[in-house]
Image (cartoon, rainbow, N blue to C red):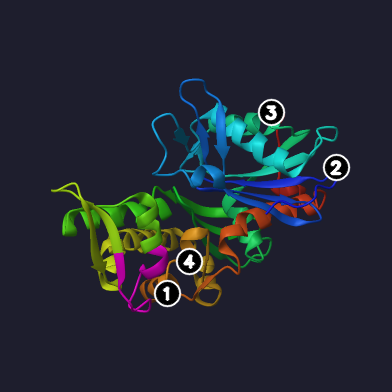
Amino acid sequence: MATRWGLGADLAIDLGTATTVIYQRGAGVMLDEPSLIATDPRTGALLAVGQDGYEMLGRAPGQVQLVRPLVGGVIRDPVGAERMVRHLVTSLRPSRIVRPRMAVALPGHVSPLERAAVEDAVLRSGARSVFTVDGTLAAAIGAQEQVSGPAACLIADIGAGKTDLALISLGGTVVARTLPIGGDTLDRAIVDWMTQEHRLLLGIRTAEDIKVRIGSAGARGPVGPMRVRGRDIDSGLPRTVVVSPDDVRAALAPVVAELRDALAALIGQAPPELAGDLVNGGLTLTGGGALLHGLPEYLSEGLHVPVRVAENPRWSTALGVGRCVEDFRGMRSMLTESVR
């Protein structure tokens, strides 16, 4: 979805486990691609990045290695991350003459080494300077929450590799927690359930498709069954089974219950005045995991607060960082400049 590059335009980057979203100052979201690279393990040559790499997932021959440079929102393959960011940024700008400032979202729990890895990857991709912003705060800004006021807002940013929870007031985080669960966890839960209940092996892309089409957190969700193809564990041959929404709901139940319980515990840690704000303000869901059918209703029933999904949950963090690059001076308190 890349469009024409404007010289000198600053960039905002949401560097996620599953997806990288890039926002250009003055133009909005310019790129939304899987955080994935394909390389030749024999030579190290870069074969594909983003969507082109994703199309190879589960289908690549032995001479193609597929790598997600980020795990749980932090860089685990610095070289791969640099190559991925450089390729995606270069796909937006044909010239290296003008190097933009770049702002990137980071999880609040990152270590100094993890922060440095992100800053280095972005600098080496062609940035003139790098700024970082707390990812959950950015998600709240992108979801149109009034983060600078005294009234509390509660955010659950459900990514692929992790979920960040934060209670925000007066422009800062009051209490926060990161869960090692996300959209990938839901996919693996479906794979495990199909293995146990049907002795059928599924690819992760098939599990994701099941989640999107008939997965739900509660009774309010899709009603029709789905035919699923995989490999029979015993015979090794292809087999098709029919899976109902109730089946998938059962597979996902432990994961969504863990999210609900963690949110309840977080609310319990909040000062009484801020917890009281949630009776009206409620919880806002961001991230791709927020799109699971029935999740707002499920959480609202369990937490006794209203729950809403951001208008564009997959882009909330990028839009929030984008707000910062649109107004560097006015949002300066939200940004930390790299001194590298």
Q: CA distance from mark 1 to mark 4?
A: 15 Å
Q: Residues within 10 Å of mark 1 (few under 14, many from 20)?
A: some
Q: Residue at x 14, y 48 (%)?
A: 235
The x, y position of residue 328, in whole percent, is 80, 48
The x, y position of residue 265, in whole percent, is 38, 59
First-in-chain label (3 vs 4) = 3
Residue wearing tag 3: 124
- The span shown in magenta is 211-227
Q: Residues within 10 Å of mark 2 (few under 14, many from 20)?
A: few
Q: Which mark identifies residue 8?
A: 2
Reply yes or no: does residue 100 show up in magenta.
Answer: no
In contact (CB < 8 Å): disc 3 and disc 4: no
Q: Quadrant where the C terminus lies?
A: top right
Residue type, numbered disc 4: Leu
Residue wearing tag 1: 300
Residue wearing tag 4: 291
Q: Nearer the viewer, mark 3 or mark 1?
A: 3
Q: CA distance from mark 1 to mark 2?
A: 44 Å
Reply yes or no: does residue 213 show up in magenta.
Answer: yes
Q: Quadrant where the N terminus lies?
A: bottom right
Horizontal side of 118 relative to 77 (left or right) equals right
In contact (CB < 8 Å): disc 4 and disc 2: no
Could one spot residue 112 in this view of the protein?
Answer: no
Could one spot residue 178 in this view of the protein?
Answer: yes
First-in-chain label (3 vs 1) = 3
Q: The residue tagged with tag 1: helix, strand or loop? A: helix
Residue type, numbered disc 1: Ser
Q: Main secondary structure of the magenta part?
A: loop
First-in-chain label (1 vs 2) = 2
First-in-chain label (1 vs 4) = 4
Q: Residue at x 71, y 45 (%)?
A: 335
63 or 253: nearer the viewer: 63
